[in-house]
Amino acid sequence: MLETAIRAAREAGRVLVEQYQRPHEVRVKGFRDIATEADFAAEKVALDVIREGCPDARFVSEESFATQPVSTQAPTWYVDPLDGTTNFARGLPLFSVSVAMAQGGQVQVGAVYDPLLDQLFYAERGQGAYLNGERLRVSERQELINSLVLLDWPRAQEPRRIEVEYLARLAPQVDAIRSRGSAALGFCSVAAGWVEAYFQYTLGPWDVAAGWLILEEAGGKATDLRGERADLTKPDWLATNGLIHEAMLAVQPFGR
Ligand code: IPD
Ligand code: CA
Ligand code: CA
């Protein structure tokens, strides 16, 4: 299954790179929400690869099958064929493909591919996390003041307001705060030890399924933004190296 996830991520990534330099057909899906022809083309390639490798696959895939599965027994594939569509459509070179399979209520394998840098992050439950074959480990930084924090922006106004409040509380206490525009790469950046934390208030399950497993297999921790157990049905996520998790939660304004 890991091989299938990796193949799907790589092949979808190849489609994205081919289409990246060309003009895009932009379709408006909602407020601050778009899709391009490349989202659909990459999704088709990824789903075909998965169907071949896993004939009884069910899908939770952003563009075509965006509903939650009812069964936890069948292998359920969470696919984001282009995570970072806004960047892609504007020519900002920062996006990824995210592919994960969950069964028995847990993510079992995950792959996140950054096709421009040819960086493949992947993990299988219990087997560690890797970047292009090198074992990943979260950073050992323990102090907020030495920590780099990544965030992405909710589309809706109210969660965005809450995020601004969190940002205002957090900014004086950390080294720096950055935003990349791909949630999957946000999780992987924590897993790789490049940053200490990542958060967002409104993510979909396809954004996080692969990155969550990769993060945990690299020794990191994910909860919701109240500090409760993470769950693919919840929108709000805090992913950290584990060591600064409580300190990050201590200054968050969510729900107050
Ligand atoms: C988006 C990105 C972004 C996050 C959004 C996601 P998309 O995914 O991951 O960083 O803030 O919530 O929807 O739409 O580019 O696949
Ligand atoms: Ca996404
Ligand atoms: Ca997407």
Image: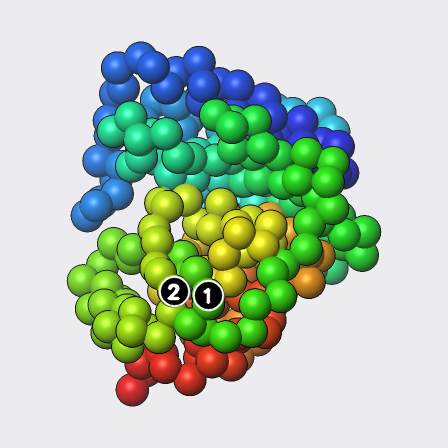
Q: CA distance from mark 2 to mark 1?
A: 5 Å
Identity of the residue drawn at 50% across and 75% down: 143
How far across and how far down the image is residue 6, in percent? 67, 32
**What's under tag 2, amino acid-wise?**
Asp
User: Does the residue at mark 2 contact the one at mark 1 (Cβ under 8 Å)?
Assistant: yes
SS label for mark 2 = loop
Q: State the image quarter where residue 63 is shown.
A: top left
Can residue 216 be seen from the camera position used here? no
Vertical relation: 33 (above or below) 203? above
Identity of the residue drawn at 57% across and 45% down: 78
SS label for mark 1 = loop
**112 or 134: which is nearer to us?**
134
How far across and how far down the image is residue 55, in percent? 73, 32
**What's under tag 1, amino acid-wise?**
Ser
How far across and how far down the image is residue 42, in percent? 48, 25
- Left or right? Give the position of 149 relative to 54: left
Vertical relation: 241 (above or below) 73? below
Residue placed under numbered mark 2 in the picture? 175
Q: Residues within 10 Å of mark 1 (few under 14, many from 20)?
A: many
Identity of the residue drawn at 37% across and 19% down: 20
Residue placed under numbered mark 1 in the picture? 147
- Left or right? Give the position of 77 relative to 128: left
Q: State the image quarter where residue 231 is shown.
A: bottom right
Q: Residues within 10 Å of mark 2 (few under 14, many from 20)?
A: some
Which quarter of the rendering shows the N terminus?
top right
